[in-house]
């Protein structure tokens, strides 16, 4: 069985033009997932701020939204991460720019720094909306990794709760697994055979993972397995973009060195140019 992955959702609150849309998205998700919502504001408490938040969230009062607001001063990244641990937040929502320039990428935006350091799952929102936009298509990574089984299971849990229509599991196969140099028709055919074998291997592995997921989370969702060959991270991000996915679900980033940050790989490709909203499962 899939244990309930999320009990408390947190969101960093800034009094910006996106405040209302961000809070609406967070409140709706908390209700869909039956979670408590914690609003984290980096700054001093004031009656005006509390009043503004109450007015924005008033439409959700009838649905018995359970929420609290905390105010803390300090470095935004440290405040949000510390508050997340203190309040046992297991899903943190943060706003993120769709595309970052290299200088911003190199220095690291608040969203990127939180992504690298957070111990809980993260939802990066790029287009928050006041009106709910149905989540119809979810793309999830199918990497050969110990964390992938939980990531896929959580994607199906989210899909069922949000009533998604389709989940595509993308298995990124590295080009170096082919081991064939293409220089004539014979080598081209050999390459195609190798690719087909690798694709069948990945489909079989993914099918075994899906078989262990309770039927209540899979029965009403169309499931597609999609092997792709290319650079890990970049390939699935590009696929999610062209497939017009509403949500991309990924494994957490690996521990990075300085050079990994200068020359992006894996999930860093996703963070550099977010193709859609991204959920990173810890």
Image: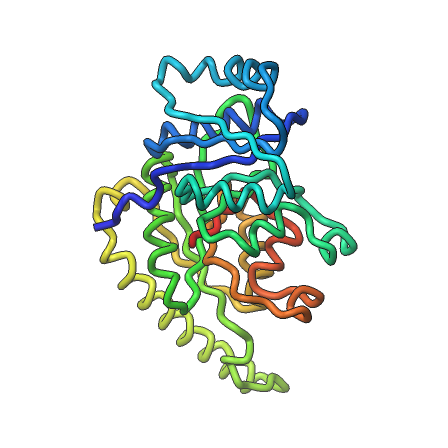
- Residue at image position (54%, 66%) is 255
Q: Quadrant of residue 227?
A: bottom left
Front-most of residues 80 and 208 = 80
Q: Residue at x 60, y 38 (%)?
A: 95
Residue 262, how many percent across, how many down?
A: 71, 66
Q: How many marks?
A: 0
Colouring method of the image = rainbow
Q: Quadrant of the C terminus?
A: bottom left
What x and y, as percent, mark residue 260? 64, 68
Q: Residue 60: give x, y in percent of width and height.
A: 42, 17
Say left or right for 279 vs 148: right
- State whether residue 88 is above or below residue 234: above
Between 93 and 183, the residue placed more toward the observer is: 93
Report the residue at 62% width, 51% height from top.
Answer: 112
Q: Position of residue 268 (x, y in %)?
A: 61, 59
**In this rendering, is residue 165 above or below 192?**
above
Q: Residue furthest right?
A: 103
Taking 158 as reference, is 148 above or below it?
below
Left/right placement of residue 203 relative to residue 26 reads left
Instruction: Please give left or right for residue 241 compared with residue 158 in the image.
Output: right
């Amino acid at each position: 069985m899939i244990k309930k992955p999320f009990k408390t959702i947190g969101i960093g609150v800034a009094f910006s033009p996106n405040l209302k849309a961000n809070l609406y998205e967070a409140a709706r998700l908390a209700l869909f997932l039956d979670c408590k919502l914690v609003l984290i504001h980096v700054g001093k408490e004031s009656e005006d701020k509390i009043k503004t938040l109450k007015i924005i969230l008033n439409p959700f009062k009838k649905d018995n939204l359970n929420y609290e607001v905390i105010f803390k001063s300090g470095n935004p990244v440290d405040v949000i991460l510390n508050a997340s641990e203190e309040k046992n937040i297991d899903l943190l929502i943060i706003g993120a720019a769709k595309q970052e320039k290299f200088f911003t990428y190199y220095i690291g935006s608040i969203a990127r720094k939180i992504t690298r350091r957070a111990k809980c799952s993260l939802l990066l929102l790029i287009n928050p909306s006041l009106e709910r936009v149905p989540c119809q298509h979810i793309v999830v990574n199918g990497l050969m990794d110990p964390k992938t089984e939980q990531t896929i299971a959580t994607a199906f849990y989210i899909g069922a709760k949000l009533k998604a229509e389709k989940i595509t599991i993308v298995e990124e196969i590295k080009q170096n697994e082919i081991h064939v140099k293409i220089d004539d028709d014979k080598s081209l055919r050999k390459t195609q055979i190798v690719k087909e074998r690798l694709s069948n291997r990945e489909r079989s592995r993914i099918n075994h993972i899906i078989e262990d997921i309770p039927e209540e989370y899979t029965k009403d969702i169309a499931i597609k397995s999609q092997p792709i060959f290319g650079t890990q991270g970049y390939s699935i991000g590009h696929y999610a973009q062209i497939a017009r996915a509403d949500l991309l679900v990924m494994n957490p980033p690996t521990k990075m060195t300085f050079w990994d940050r200068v020359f992006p790989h894996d999930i860093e490709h996703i963070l550099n140019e977010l193709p859609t909203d991204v959920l990173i499962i810890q």
